[in-house]
Image (cartoon, rainbow, N blue to C red):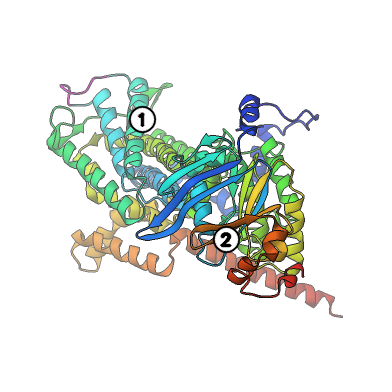
Amino acid sequence: MNALPSRESLSAASSANALELRGVSRLFGALAALSDITLSVRPGERRAVLGSNGAGKTTLFNCITGDFPPSSGIIRFFGEDVTAFPPHERIRRGLRRTYQISSLFTGLSVLDNVYLACRGVSRSRFSLLRPRRDEALMHAAEGLVEAVHLAPVRDRLVGELAYGQQRQLEIALALSGAPRFILFDEPAAGLSPTERRDLVHILTSLPGHIGYIIIEHDMDVALRVVESVTMMHNGRIFKEGRPEDIETDPEVQELYLGGGDPGGAHG
Amino acid sequence: MAITDTRPLDPPAPARDRLGEVIARQGAAFWVVVVLMLAMPLIAPTFWLVQIFAYAMILGMIALSLMFLAGYGGIVSLVQMTVAAFAAYLVAIFGDSAIAQISLKWPWWAAVPVAVVIATLFGTLSGALSVRTEGIYTIMITLAIASAFYYLCLQNYTIFNGFSGFNGILPPVFLGIDWGGNVAFYYLTLACAALACAVVVYVSRAPFGLALQGTRDNPRRMAALGFNVVAHRIAAYAFASVIAAFAGVLLVWYQRQVSPGTAGVGPVVDVLIIAVVGGMSRPIGPFIGALVYVLLRTFALDLLEAVGLDGKRFQLLVGLGFLVIVLFSPDGLVGIWARITERYRRSREARAAQMRIGGDAP
């Protein structure tokens, strides 16, 4: 539809990893928020990044999206070196993210928020002409609003929405355009049990070619929607593996779960 | 963009119908203003027509360009008056004026577009210089550009003719009408102001304007949606500069002269005051602010002398009015109006509800 990479570049890229980090570090003054992170995620792979507060998870996301460029190291997105790219260039290549604290346009309606997101990755983002009702991008925006169960409130101002609805809208924005890889930063934070079930449903029913990394403290959500897990501690990768292995790993339990009952994660 | 939708679409509504919809949605206040403005030459004496209303509409257009940047983009630029003054100078330089050794005497239809294009480029460039800064720093940089332009005009004699500037600039005669005539000039400014206002209202809901409001509310998120925030802000400067440049052309036709004083720091700050007093939330705000400003400027002198004060203190009155409005309504006069209509609507609804209850009673 728009901003889609050509077929050739897609097939060339499909042999590469969706995301590849080599020796990525990020310093804040003398503090190393990330040190020497090497990580690769296959196209379509779904991975959880776990770790206690301050482990560097959100900083990792900020380096991948370019919000904070890494102090050293290389980031490749579908084979392309994007280390020096500004955020919007990475987004136009199919990377998306959501924010831990909802980061929406509270003065605009739900539909306008999603429509803006669809515009951002289209070529007509400077258009001075108003959208027509039958425009393809408007259809796409309406479809996304429905996909995250927000159709009944689509004309309401975002500032008036309930917290859970704002979290759902965050996800809709990340799904706009043609995403190839999404970074979810604690999407379940503050959601009710019902809303968590909806969230798991939305995540598991994403098209298979869309990979993602999810930061999530709720193991019940995180381990149900991923096939691999990366554990972080003090800005380093501490362990990688399948969800079931990580869950039962004694070292992990001591560090992250604080020796709690691992069975509780199954809820 | 490729045609992706192959389903038979409903025929799109003809443009005229949608314009009709827009017109039908306007309230009574809108129609009162439209009729009043159109019939003004029948009601108002010449002095009011040109010195008050036409002048207010020109200043309103300049303030509108600031309102677009500040209201939708969160960019407080002090360079809008300078863009207008530059366009005014360029009309004098390329067109005809009493300063025969500088003016190139191009016909107006060549001088005006060139003036607008160059002034817009200047405004866009100023934007590109200041757009990476925020808040007070944007104000400082744009103020510095405005001051630099003022001193350039003042001290350069080969192009800007220094202190005395240009005089004897006349509005053109075309379509058999002398646009310098009072009624004709009034309608010319009315048409330009209405058009500028309508374009701003339209663009505010178009993708460009929506995205600009997005960069105001949350620039980081806009980048995370694929928008180049810096490029978008520079484009906003370009759009606002077009409006300011056209206003500058009208300004030089209105004043029939242009001098460094047109671009001085006083007028530069006045545009900010006009926009704030009128209200930055809606495009009509700057025009209301400009009308109040022109009325105060014109009549404060008489008013002050009537109560036995020095007439030269009219700026004091302007300043006091500014303070009172900003203190009581951060949203300007438009905000006060919005609150009054809201209260009226509520009390009417309450009364209607009471009548319904009363009617049900046996």
Seen from the viewer's position, the closer of residues B39 and A53 is: A53
Farthest residue, direction bottom: B362
**Main SS of the magenta segment?**
loop
Seen from the viewer's position, the closer of residues B278 and B76 is: B76
> Within the magenta stretch, is there residue A115?
no
Residue type, mark 2 in image: Gln
Q: Which residue is mark 1?
A: B116
Seen from the viewer's position, the closer of residues A3 and B230 is: A3
Front label number (1 vs 2): 2
Q: Residue A219, how many percent across, how many down?
A: 69, 65
Magenta residues, start to end: B99-105
Which of the labelled discs sits on residue A100, or is there none?
A: 2
Q: Residue at x 87, y 80 (%)?
A: B362
Tell me whether circle 1 and circle 2 mark residues in contact (CB < 8 Å).
Answer: no
* In-image side of B219 versus B3 (left or right): left
Residue type, mark 1 in image: Val
> Is residue B214 in view from this perspective?
no
